[in-house]
Image: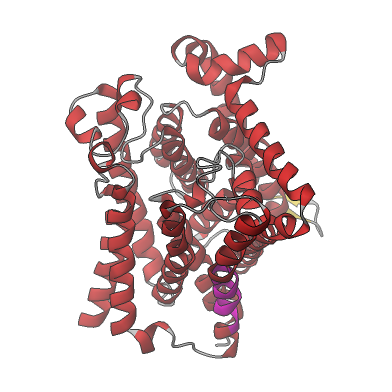
Amino acid sequence: MNKVFNTDSFFAFLLFFSISMPSFSNSIGNAGVILVNGLILFLLFFYFFLKYNYLLKFEDSLDKRNALNYIYFISFFVFLMPLSTAIGVFWGGVSVIERDFYEFYRPVFYSLIFIFSYSFFSKNYRVLLLEKYLFYLFVIIVLFGLNHFFRMFDSISELYTKPKNISTLRVSTPFVNPYDYAFVMSFFAYYFFFKLMYERLYYIILFVVAVFMLILPQSRSVAIGFLVGFFFIVPIVLTYLGFTLKTARLNKKLLFYYFLLFFVFVSFLLSLPYLLEDFKYLTGQFVRLLENGSVGNSANLRMNQFLFALGKAENNPFILFFGNGPAKNEMEYVESIYNYLFYRYGIAGVLFYFFILVVAIIQGFKILKKIGQNSKNYALFLGVILWFITIPFLSIGNNFTEQFRISFFYYTLLGFVASSYYQIVLKKI
């Protein structure tokens, strides 16, 4: 029992540490990322050393194959990164700088997070622990955000984000960038909406708070991605899950969802005047797009980055398939997951990244079908899977799952889905 307690506590520590540990970016710059992720990496290595047999102990061949399907594709970047870097140097004219080598820790870091998460959720009771931790995590992130927005203690926000974000009230704390905050909050918006649908009506309070906090960072790309997900993808998925073909009937939960969707849509329309007046950074670009077709500087930057990456790829098939490596001296801040993957790792990187995501989504649907809507964990799994489905839309504006703090959260949820797939769908009782 002591070992179980220690593992539970270790998981909780890593989860909350990854979100709430200050990065001191205003004092030490990018070294803050190395400080936080480096300590997590060290602790995972240490835990892996102590629990080697436990972490790699599979129940049967199906369990092993299921885990390795993910591990192989995540760790593939260990080999792809030096290959891409060499191609970038010899054929892409890239000059390697010191910061490029810092990127090489990523695939090892992500693999260890996934392995630990996969092993952790092999115990079914830990799903309930995850729900509890997610609630506490939400409260922490909201409190940080409210402190940022109302500027109660700027000295706290300065430990996490840039002075410009504080002065403009674009909420980002405890993350560095506002769009990172909005991206994570989009998960909680989905999660609490489905808790409202399938469990208790009082979750509407947490859903409203999550949506409000999603708006405060004023991230246009996340806002668009969330609207597409919530008003188009969610109805399709829930109709698919809730429609019985044999009887051509919709279940009661689905009818309740349509009512909620209508209520949310009307509320959104009624809030538009307020959003247009008080959140001009968020809404102004959409107004200009409708008035004169202007897509704005941010969209132009992303398009120019893609055209630059495509231009290099067209001149060399090796760059097309394997990319240029990190190449921070040439393109340091890549503003889209598609540009990020294609420029750095070519077609191979794009395919491997999205293959992992697609596998998790497919497995998630099988879990949902298996457990049914009466399961106490249905809302959690549905929230995670819907968030995964919308990541390709949310990430048009940034490479979120590669970002500081978010990567631990993302790969933990991947491990959660993969491990649950074995326990619920594959395991032979």
For the N terminus, the image quarter is bottom left
Q: Tell me if 215 is positioned left or right of 359 in this view.
A: left
Across and down, in percent, residue 242 comes to: 68, 52
Asked whether 390 or 201 is in front, the reply is: 390
Instruction: Give me the residue at 25% from left, 30% from top.
Output: 147
Give the residue drawn at x 40%, y 36%: 177
The reply to whether residue 1 is in sight is no
Q: Is residue 366 above or below residue 327?
A: below
Total number of numbered discs in the rendering: 0
Q: Residue 322: within the magenta? A: no
Query: Main structural element of the magenta stretch: helix, strand or loop?
Result: helix
The reply to whether residue 262 is in sight is yes
Q: Is residue 35 left or right of residue 74?
A: left
Find residue 151 and report its horizontal and vertical position in percent. 23, 23
User: Which x, y percent locates residue 319?
Assistant: 70, 56
How is colour applied across the structure in the image?
secondary structure
| Residue located 68% across and 16% down the image | 294
Residue closest to the eye, 105 or 379: 105
Work out whether 78 lies above or below 138: below
- Locate residue 305: give its quadrant: top right
Instruction: Examine the rendered structure and indicate whether residue 204 appears above or below residue 74.
Output: above
Q: Is residue 149 left or right of residue 325?
A: left
Q: Position of residue 311 (x, y in %)?
A: 74, 42
Is residue 75 located in the magenta-colored stretch of the structure? yes
Residue at image coords 35%, 19%: 168
Residue 260: quarter of image = top right
Quadrant showing the C terminus? bottom right
- Magenta region: which residues? 65-76
